Image: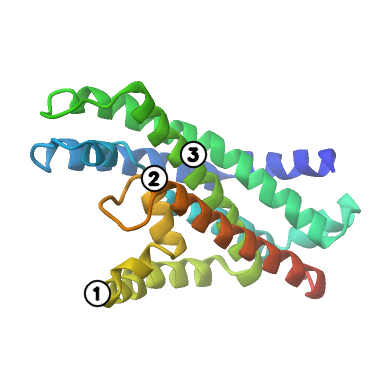
Amino acid sequence: MIGLLKGELIKTMTTRTVYGFALGGIAFTVLNVLIVAKASGSLDELPEKEEALSALPILLLLWGLVGAAGEYKHRTAAPAALVGGHGRAVTLLARIVAYALTALVLGGLMVAVSLGLGLPLLAGHPGPDLGAADVTAVAAGNFVAFVLSAVMGAAIGALLRSPVLGVVLLLIVNFAVIPLVAGSHEELTNLTPFGAAGVLARMSHNTTLSVASAGWVLLAWTALLVAVALVCEKRRDLA
């Protein structure tokens, strides 16, 4: 199992995809900090300042989806299962764990950029300052959102097996379906993976869902999708 995990880690860390998402994550993190901390006027409440330090978990979800689905598109999933000799579900589980570990690295880069750029910019705003406990809580929430989002993305990628289809469906749900639901039942959006990840990463505030509850909601969605992906992996052809 350790050897299988090492092999999956090598694949996730050496493809060009991971470098593209790393650069994209850093770029969007910088953009978010500048928009919230510089272009949004005075931030005099702690939740508003925490939002400036948030990142975008959806990028890690997309990365997990594209990477895992690409295994089937490029027909590398079947050889990995055959060479590893541990069965389809175990191989997929190792792949998912590899994406979770790699998400810690990508998330670390994004959090480092948000804190390094955001904290100095927030120092000039009125109201209470973010303390060490506040900053730690924001960083921890982002890390949890990153890891669970990447795992969820890998599970969805294994289910759909098409990077293009997965990305299109994800964007439609996030930018079309979720806003429609929010228009009539805003509280329901917090119970979706996107809404829960946003609350956990501090992208959303003044919601009816607490940060801790958002973590449990996101964990429940992740566990469900991983379980479904593992069951389907056993019953479907890899080729």
**CA–CA distance in space, label 1 to label 3:** 29 Å
Across and down, in percent, residue 112 comes to 40, 28
In this rendering, is residue 163 above or below 183?
Answer: above
Which residue occupies the extreme left position in the image?
41
Q: Which residue is mark 1?
A: 183
Asked if labels 2 and 3 touch by Cβ distance under 8 angstroms, the answer is no
Please rate how many residues cluster around mark 3, counting C-alpha atoms within 10 Å: few if below 14, some from 14 to 19, many from 20.
many
Helix, strand or loop at mark 1 = helix
User: On the picture, is 154 further left or further right than 111?
Assistant: right
The front one of 195 and 62 is: 195
Please rate how many residues cluster around mark 2, counting C-alpha atoms within 10 Å: few if below 14, some from 14 to 19, many from 20.
many
Image quadrant where one finds the C terminus: bottom right
Q: Which mark is residue 143?
A: 3
Q: Amino acid at mark 2?
A: Ala
Q: Amino acid at mark 3?
A: Phe
**Residue at the image point whose x is 59% and y is 69% from the top:** 162
Q: Earlier in the sequence, mark 1 or mark 2?
A: 1
Across and down, in percent, residue 97 comes to 68, 46
Q: Quadrant of residue 189?
A: bottom left
Q: Earlier in the sequence, mark 1 or mark 3?
A: 3
Q: Which residue is mark 2?
A: 201
In this rendering, is residue 38 above or below 69?
Answer: above
